[in-house]
Amino acid sequence: MQEFTDRIAVVTGAAGGIGLGLTRKCLDQGMHVVMADIDETRLAEVARQLRQNSSQDSSLVTVVPTDVSDRASISRLVDVVEGLESEIALVFNNAGVASSGDLGQLWNATHDDWQKLIDVNLWGVINGCMGFLPILMQQSSPSRIVNVASIAGVITAPALAIYTMTKHAVVSLGESLDQQLQAAEASVAVSTVCPGFVRTHLTDGLSLEGSDGGDVSPTMRENLTWFEERVRDGTDPAELADRVFEGITHERRYIFTHSGFRDAVVERFDTILEDLDSARPHHGG
């Protein structure tokens, strides 16, 4: 896929981190970027700075405060995009969150911990895909949905078990959806981004203090420190965006942006294959 100039890119979670890196990259490509984020104040300020500092036409930035977990909010975002005059080239379902309660044992996580991560990290992607697919499938020009998962979507990360679960689901969604669209000979395809650690706001606000009866254990504190250090030392979002666009131009179903996780992937799948091979043969498969 090479056609970007004068076409629309939709970016959720656009007010910082990976989303802002993708937004800047899209603007560099001459695209009209629709920036969506739940943080209306930060979104407006970031957009103001982009318009002020960009060499591009300032009208190429449209801001839409959006809660990706809310279908009605996504519908409003879709309506805004439909009202623009250009075709959509890229939809980045990027918005994601982490939870302090996910840093310990699963049996100590609260219902709210589970709900928050599933609502944003999984339903946010589902809502973005289902909201924009009808438009994309009617377009004649090639387009692509780009779902941002994580390397945690293909390996096991017990220190962030619920987060990891949601990212596995996003990977599976992208795989199935892309295969179905390919079988239907649609003009739209799906890529799933599985990055390693990136300098983002993912750990902002994570704190073990004030947990209402939760397991504030040494393990949780150790996991939080580990997580914050990895994010702080992660890849710059601008560099990450370059790697993502390289994957898009090569039309990759999976976009892996970090090479240091191969051993972990191999270890997981070796265990799966070992247990699969131990299954007793029986009639029917």
Image (tube, grey):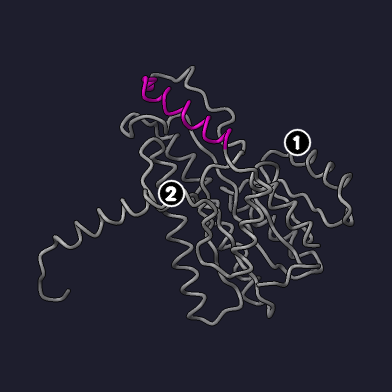
Q: Amino acid at mark 1?
A: Thr
The quadrant the N terminus occupies is bottom right
Query: Which mark's residue is nearer the viewer, 1 or 2?
Result: 2
Q: Position of residue 110 (x, y in %)?
A: 39, 31
The residue at which mark 2 appears reads as 261
Looking at the image, residue 180 lies above or below residue 110: below
**Residue nearer the viewer, 233 or 110:** 233
**Residue nearer the viewer, 104 or 193:** 193
Which residue lies at the image location 49% right of the left edge and 17% below the top edge? Answer: 209
The quadrant the C terminus occupies is bottom left
Per the image, is 224 magenta?
yes
Looking at the image, residue 284 lies above or below residue 35: below
Looking at the image, residue 199 lies above or below residue 80: above
- Say left or right for 266 vs 275: right
Which residue lies at the image location 59% right of the left edge and 58% below the top edge? Answer: 128
Q: Amino acid at mark 2?
A: Phe
- Say left or right for 65 vs 68: right
Mark 1–mark 2 CB contact (< 8 Å) = no
What is the number of callouts on the image? 2
Per the image, is 18 magenta?
no
**Residue nearer the viewer, 230 or 51:** 230
Mark 2 Cα shell of 10 Å, populated few (<14), some (14-19), many (≥20): some
Q: Position of residue 214 (x, y in %)?
A: 38, 22
Magenta highlight range: 214-233
